[in-house]
Image: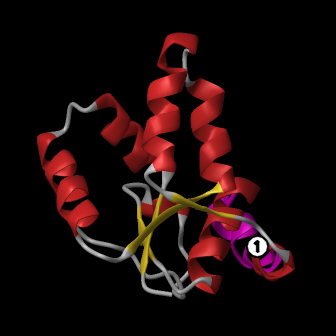
Amino acid sequence: MTGILVDSDILIEVFRGRNRILLQAWHDLSQREDLIATSAINVAELWRGVLAPEREALRQLLAELTCLPLDREEGELAGELMRRYAPSHGLELPDALIASVAVTQRLNFWTRNRRHFPMPELRFYDV
């Protein structure tokens, strides 16, 4: 699969609409034919913080993306990532699950929080 998995921090910035550089990158990306995806974990992170009057706008933003599910393969990899990186880097389960989706689906990962994702098998998307 060719494309990009978008992390919650990027989606929050797109949703807020304040960062011109990031919005231009989002627009440019949406013009390409690559898959633009997020994970169910990211959806949960966003939904947890959205205010009631903003819910419909968030639904519209998320409707533009493919939401990738978690399967056994992602679960196994996330467990392995936790074993390797939780003790030394403080990796938390949601980030391990998100990273496992990007790795198993062979997607570049767009995040500003690279320090949360120390694993070398993860390919980052650069703006």
Q: Amino acid at mark 1?
A: Ala
- State the image coordinates of residue 89 (x, y, percent, origin top left): 62, 65
Does the stretch in magenta take in 36? no
From the image, tell me which residue sits under label 1. Answer: 78
Placement of 1 over or under 15, stated as above or below: below
- At 41% from the left edge and 38% from the top edge, which residue is drawn? 12
Q: Is residue 26 left or right of residue 123?
A: left
Span shown in magenta? 79-92
Q: Secondary structure at mark 1?
A: helix
Q: How is the image coloured?
A: secondary structure
| Residue at position x 76%, y 73% in the image | 78
| Residue 92, image quadrant | bottom right
Magenta residues, dominant SS class: helix
Residue 34: quadrant of the picture:
bottom left
Q: Is residue 52 shown left or right of residue 83?
A: left
Q: Residues within 10 Å of mark 1 (few under 14, many from 20)?
A: many
- Would you identify the image quadrant in which residue 3 lies? bottom left
Q: Position of residue 53 (x, y in %)?
A: 50, 11
Which residue does the image show at 56% across and 75% down from the upper left?
102
**x, y percentage for residue 120?**
51, 86
Q: Quadrant of the C terminus?
A: bottom left
Compared with 96, 40 (above or below) is above
